[in-house]
């Protein structure tokens, strides 16, 4: 009997854990290779975890709603075809025991504050708030909680949404429909309650029991030194606690800035030929290929061509070693319906023609918007392209997606009068212009290299053959 372990897959560079939403299989069930075993949710996407082998499930190590770190064994599968040992259901399995640190004896009395003059209004994030009213055991996936937080939907509102998922669970479709109804006035807005500091009752002191004595924990007072500066609540304000996804994004961005000394270079490109070529062939392209042609695959084709001349751009740093990547895996920042971004990766982008790039780009974008990305779709990127022009921005200073060493941002395409150099002399014409900006890791990418690469990309855009086929 050969037992293999199915682990929680990695779903992105900044994702460290996932929540189990539903088990599609139980102990003793036969499973085929690539058949869905369970459904999971992260702060960015909901996903299905397929089996890596065919066989029989012998052990399920976690329950629904458990938060499991990436790389942890979640299921064991007997690939020998036997029924395997009988294993209790997840609710009966013994979970790993938490290691309890020894409690030190406290030899002094901790004073209890009797007066408070400044009271900080605590904010309970929606993901950890206690359920008051409604279904006290209702579970919300991280994706739903993230959408709720980003749209300012309170816990009370969330509990009143009628879910269509399993066991009445609120799905992404349910909350997006609620948001749409709310915007058009079909949903009655809950009454806002203004809370002042003087109306907040002083919480009772917490009692912490230890094996040796009872310690009364002090409440905040004017004489208590806070670990962080207290937020002064005054006027008509709203305090919002960062949700878990925003905290992860913040950490990822800060870590990147602390890891890589960022330098950003700028240039502009005349992309008139690209615009005119796309306008000319887009209907025929969609009819014959069955996929729309956007600027993204056009940009990626040019970028990968230039990257081959600048191998240090397609690299990473580990300690004092520079690792030059031979594969050209281009990540493309994609907006999700919740307003967050995820970066699916086009593997072997340099090996695909424009048709292949277009289909891959569209398929990954559709999968991202519909929460159908597979774990492998967001891994292995060596360089990232982000289109800030999608949101109307002319340019930006993007932050490097670690462990890569560069990220390129393309801005909005605008028609402007520019000087055109011709053999007959200079003239002024209306051209489609676009700003490019690239942030790079100054540890290994010097300013001359970064600026040269960016300029070469702009020239590659400009010399797009307007008469080419696809």
Image (tube, rainbow, N blue to C red):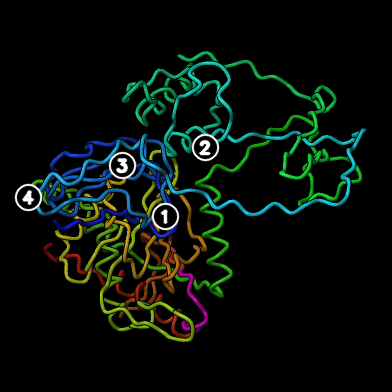
Disc 3 and disc 2 in contact, CB within 8 angstroms: no
Q: Image check: 32 left or right of 419?
A: left
Please state the horizontal and vertical placement of residue 205, each as a whole percent of the image: 80, 33
Q: Residues within 10 Å of mark 3 (few under 14, many from 20)?
A: some
Please state the horizontal and vertical placement of residue 267, each as a whole percent of the image: 45, 71
Q: Within the image, what quadrant is residue 110 found in?
A: top right
Lower sequence index among marks 3 and 2: 2
Lower sequence index among marks 1 and 4: 4
Task: Report, in whole angstroms, how far the alpha carbon at label 3 lies from the one at label 1.
Answer: 27 Å
Q: Residue at x 45, y 67 (%)?
A: 402
Image mark for residue 412: 1
Q: Image check: 421 left or right of 402?
A: left
Quadrant in the picture for the N terminus: bottom left
* Residue stretch rendered in magenta on the structure: 438-447
Lower sequence index among marks 4 and 3: 4
Task: Report, in whole angstroms, how far the alpha carbon at label 4 lies from the one at label 2.
Answer: 40 Å
Q: Is residue 414 visible?
A: no
Disc 4 and disc 3 in contact, CB within 8 angstroms: no
In the displayed structure, 436 sits above or below 95; it is below
Which residue position is annotated with label 4? Answer: 288
Give the camera-side residue of 348 and 273.
348
Which residue position is annotated with label 2? Answer: 150
Which residue position is annotated with label 3? Answer: 371
Please state the horizontal and vertical placement of residue 98, each as a whole percent of the image: 52, 49
């Amino acid at each position: 009997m050969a037992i293999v372990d199915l682990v929680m897959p990695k779903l992105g560079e900044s994702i460290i854990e996932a929540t189990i939403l539903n088990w599609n299989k139980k102990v003793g069930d036969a499973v085929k290779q690539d058949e869905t075993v369970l459904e999971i949710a992260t702060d960015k996407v909901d996903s299905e975890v397929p089996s890596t082998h065919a066989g029989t499930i012998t052990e399920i190590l976690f329950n629904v709603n458990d938060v499991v770190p990436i790389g942890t064994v979640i299921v064991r599968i007997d690939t020998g075809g036997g029924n395997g040992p009988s294993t209790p259901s997840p609710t009966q399995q013994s979970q790993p025991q938490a290691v309890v640190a020894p409690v030190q004896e406290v030899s002094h009395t901790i004073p209890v504050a009797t007066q408070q003059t400044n009271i900080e209004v605590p904010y309970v994030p929606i993901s950890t708030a206690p359920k008051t009213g409604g279904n006290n055991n209702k579970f919300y996936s991280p994706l739903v909680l993230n959408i709720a937080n980003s749209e300012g939907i309170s816990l009370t509102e969330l509990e009143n949404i009628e879910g269509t998922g399993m066991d009445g669970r609120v799905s992404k479709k349910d909350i997006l429909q609620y948001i749409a109804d709310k915007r058009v006035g079909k949903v009655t807005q809950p009454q806002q309650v203004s809370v002042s500091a003087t109306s907040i009752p002083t919480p009772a002191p917490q009692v912490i029991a230890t094996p040796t004595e009872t310690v009364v924990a002090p409440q905040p007072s004017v004489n208590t030194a806070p670990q962080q500066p207290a937020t002064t609540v005054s006027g008509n304000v709203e305090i919002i606690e960062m949700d878990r996804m925003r905290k992860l994004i913040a950490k990822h961005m800060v870590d990147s800035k602390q890891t890589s000394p960022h330098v950003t270079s700028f240039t502009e490109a005349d992309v008139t030929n690209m615009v005119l070529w796309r306008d000319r062939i887009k209907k025929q392209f969609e009819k014959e290929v069955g996929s729309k042609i956007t600027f993204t695959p056009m940009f990626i084709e040019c970028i990968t061509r230039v990257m081959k001349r600048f191998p240090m751009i397609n690299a990473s740093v580990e300690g004092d070693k520079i690792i030059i990547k031979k594969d050209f895996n281009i990540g493309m920042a994609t907006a999700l319906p919740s307003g967050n971004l995820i970066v699916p990766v086009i593997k072997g982008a340099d090996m695909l023609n424009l048709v292949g790039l277009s289909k891959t780009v569209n398929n990954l974008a559709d999968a991202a918007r519909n929460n159908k990305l597979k774990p492998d779709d967001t891994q292995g990127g060596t360089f990232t392209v982000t289109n800030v022009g999608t949101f109307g921005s002319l340019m930006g200073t993007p932050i490097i997606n670690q462990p890569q060493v560069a990220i390129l941002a393309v801005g909005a395409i605008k028609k402007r009068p520019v000087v055109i150099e011709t053999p007959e002399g200079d003239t002024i014409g209306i051209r489609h212009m676009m700003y490019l900006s690239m942030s790079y890791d100054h540890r290994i990418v010097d300013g001359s290299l970064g600026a040269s690469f960016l300029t070469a990309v702009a020239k590659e855009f400009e010399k797009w053959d307007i008469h080419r086929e696809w």
